[in-house]
């Protein structure tokens, strides 16, 4: 199949409803400026930006796919599950995400307290100001550390303080994968495994059983295209996805100025993701909704 004349898309982006820097409507506007045909907004653990993004999409005539990125519990590395085509008016989805919102609210002051114990005087107010009213995550605390001159870069803030091995790290509540997938499916969405490289499984033999388990729980696809995948990783994911009959997806993981090296709609400087991926996702969803009720 030729993709040469296909319009381009991006299926993994963040706004300031989570830890991106642009408001949802500005992410959509930028996508339009880049000439994209479809964009999914996939904020971490929240759907608060979706109404604004969808409205902006209507105004600008750009297809906005309502999405989310949920952190799931996994013994090794980190597992993120993307949800697409969500009914973001779902009360049940809102309730389930509220659990995660509360977990963050409980966690952030604990991180601040750990920093304070080390003589670093960052306040919750500073961090909230940086987040601009959206939900607070570690990248905002990292920025506060940077702005206070405590670290030379955001990366250093993670390396020393906030990363999983950092001295001020605090873990947070996560749903197990089956619940993350169920909450997406119950909201009429389709579930996709994000950036598999973060799972720490680097061979077909180790990744295949996990993908099969997730498929049995209702996983529809795998994010094969991601700026952080090496060519070898990308090839591995594509071959497993084809073998197992899953959907291929991809996205830039755009975060605005919080990840300045990432460009909306591009994977390593190239627009590589084409609209046929969206068509396949829609067909999968129709089948799942039609078949399962
Ligand atoms: P949170 O949702 O508050 O746990 O923050 C997670 C976000 O922090 C991720 O989406 C990344 O953007 C960022 N992050 C996590 N670990 C690191 C790290 N080691 N280095 C840089 N950024 C990180
Ligand atoms: Zn993020
Ligand atoms: Fe992620
Ligand atoms: Fe992301």
Image (spheres, rainbow, N blue to C red):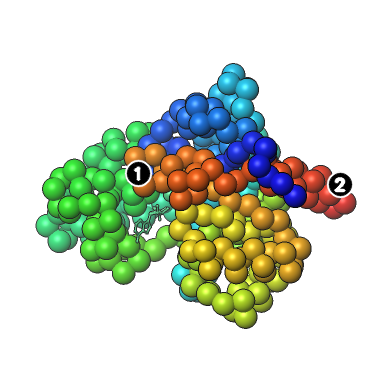
Q: Is residue 105 left or right of residue 183?
A: left
Q: CA distance from mark 2 to mark 1?
A: 41 Å
Q: Rate crowding at label 1 as few (under 14), some (14 to 19) or many (20 or more) other CA atoms within 10 Å.
A: few
**Residue 206 visible in the picture:** yes
Q: Position of residue 291 (x, y in %)?
A: 87, 51
Q: Rate crowding at label 2 as few (under 14), some (14 to 19) or many (20 or more) other CA atoms within 10 Å.
A: few
Marks 2 and 1 close (CB-CB < 8 Å): no
Q: Position of residue 195 (x, y in %)?
A: 53, 59
Which residue is denoted by mark 1 in the rendering? 260
Q: Residue at x 13, y 48 (%)?
A: 149
Q: Quadrant of residue 234?
A: bottom right
Q: Position of residue 42 (x, y in %)?
A: 54, 44
Rendered position, 160 above or below 26:
below
SS at mark 1 in the image: loop
Q: Is residue 64 left or right of residue 259?
A: right
Rendered position, 277 above or below 178:
above
Residue 79's tag is none
Q: Residue at x 61, y 27 (%)?
A: 62
Q: Earlier in the sequence, mark 2 or mark 1?
A: 1
Q: Residue at x 66, y 42 (%)?
A: 4
The residue furthest right is 291
Which residue is denoted by mark 2 in the rendering? 290
């Amino acid at each position: 199949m030729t993709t040469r004349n296909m319009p381009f898309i991006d299926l993994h982006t963040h706004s300031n409803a989570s830890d991106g820097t642009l408001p949802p409507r500005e992410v959509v506007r930028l996508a339009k400026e880049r000439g994209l045909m479809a964009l999914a907004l996939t904020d971490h653990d929240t759907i608060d930006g979706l109404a604004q993004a969808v409205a902006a999409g209507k105004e600008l005539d750009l297809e906005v796919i309502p999405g989310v990125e949920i952190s799931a519990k996994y013994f090794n590395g980190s597992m993120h599950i993307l949800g697409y085509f969500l009914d973001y008016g779902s009360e049940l989805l809102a309730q389930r995400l509220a659990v995660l919102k509360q977990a963050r609210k409980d966690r952030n002051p604990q991180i601040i307290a750990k920093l304070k114990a080390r003589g670093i005087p960052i306040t919750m107010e500073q961090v909230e100001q940086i987040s601009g009213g959206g939900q607070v995550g570690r990248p905002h605390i990292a920025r506060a550390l940077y702005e206070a001159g405590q670290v030379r870069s955001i990366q250093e803030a993670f390396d020393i303080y906030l990363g999983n091995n950092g001295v001020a790290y605090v873990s947070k509540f996560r749903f197990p994968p089956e619940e993350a997938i169920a909450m997406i499916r119950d909201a009429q969405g389709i579930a996709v495994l994000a950036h598999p490289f973060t799972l720490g499984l680097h061979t077909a033999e180790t990744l295949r059983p996990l993908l099969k388990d997730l498929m049995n729980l209702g996983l529809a696809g795998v994010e094969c295209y991601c700026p952080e995948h090496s060519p070898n990783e990308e090839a591995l994911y594509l071959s497993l996805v084809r073998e197992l009959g899953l959907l291929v997806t991809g996205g830039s993981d755009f975060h605005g100025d919080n990840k300045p090296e990432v460009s909306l709609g591009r994977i390593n400087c190239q627009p590589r993701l084409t609209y046929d991926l969206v068509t396949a996702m829609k067909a999968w969803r129709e089948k799942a909704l039609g078949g399962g009720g």
